[in-house]
Image (spheres, helix red, strand yellow):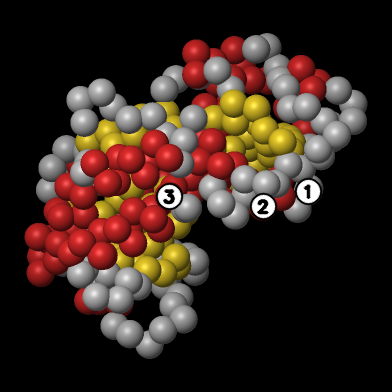
Amino acid sequence: MKYVVRILILIGLYGFTSCSSSNTEEKLNIAVAANMQFTVKAIAKGFTAKTGIECNLIISSSGKLTAQVEAGAPYDVFVSANMKYPKSLYKSGKTYDTPRIYAYGKLVLWTMDTLQSPSLALLQEGKIAHIAMANPKMAPYGIAAQEVLEKNGLDKIVENKLVYGESILQTNQFIVTQAANIGFTSLSTVIATPMKEKGKWLQIPENNHTPIAQGIVQLKNDKRKAAQSKQFVNFMFSSEAQNLLKAYGYGIPSNN
């Protein structure tokens, strides 16, 4: 079957857009944390090739997606950037099962200024006017970035330089357009094909922040698609999907 996957830009609360007139109700609606924007396309392509099941991908921050699910958004699977949000949906009865960790995210400092070598020390310098990071209130990578600043005694020093994206997706836009001189993003972003030749980056040692354990959970939406959404969750733990996650810079849980 021909592979079809669309990344949908959120409009309003949980509006869909699509460049096709095909019926989205026949596809799985998969809510995806923004750090997975490139990786999930490859995974969805493999899933569709194997099962014939097509997917709509809705990309946003984990916090915003959680709020939309709680408000009734018609999503079938939630691919989160942490475990907190899927666990909260499980506790509120919005999921079939408990969430599972499918990968561990990694944090980097990224800049488009190739004359600069990214470092935490660089953040203090006067030539750095704006530092981008995802909003810690909505995005797990923002929480990790905030922990890095606090651990290294930089949070008060650079607080007036910080500019917040509502997700890693918007944070990346700040960095790529140089609205920010430098910023925190996911390793998966900077090694993805569209971005790997852009700028310079430095991976943040993982002992600088709480592990970014990313969870997936099957949502109670359309019962007619329950078997298919379960298939997608299971596919995330297949060797094919796990190898893709590793290729895109994620750590894999040892029990997978």
Residue 219, position in %: x, y? 20, 53
Direction from residue 150 to residue 49 in the image, left or right: left
Mark 3 is surrounded, within 10 Å at the Cα level, by few (under 14), some (14 to 19) or many (20 or more) other residues, namely many
Spatial CA span between label 2 and label 3: 18 Å
Mark seen at residue 39: 3
Q: Observer-nearest residue: 25 or 7?
A: 7
Mark 2–mark 1 contact, CB under 8 Å? yes
- The answer to the question of whether label 3 and label 1 lie on touching residues, with beta carbons closer than 8 A, is no
Q: Nearer the viewer, residue 58 or 238?
A: 238
Mark 3: which amino acid? Thr
Q: Rate crowding at label 1 as few (under 14), some (14 to 19) or many (20 or more) other CA atoms within 10 Å.
A: some
Instruction: Name the mark on residue 113.
Output: none
Mark 2 — residue?
A: 173
* Mark 1, secondary structure of its residue: loop
The residues tagged by marks 3 and 1 sit, at their Cα atoms, a distance apart of 25 Å
The local crowd at label 2, few if under 14, some if 14 to 19, many if 20 or more residues have their Cα within 10 Å, is some
Q: Quadrant of residue 118?
A: top right
Q: Is residue 35 above or below residue 249?
A: below
Is 242 on the left-hand or right-hand side of 134? left
Residue 73 appearing in the image: no
Residue positioned 60% across, 31% down in the render? 108
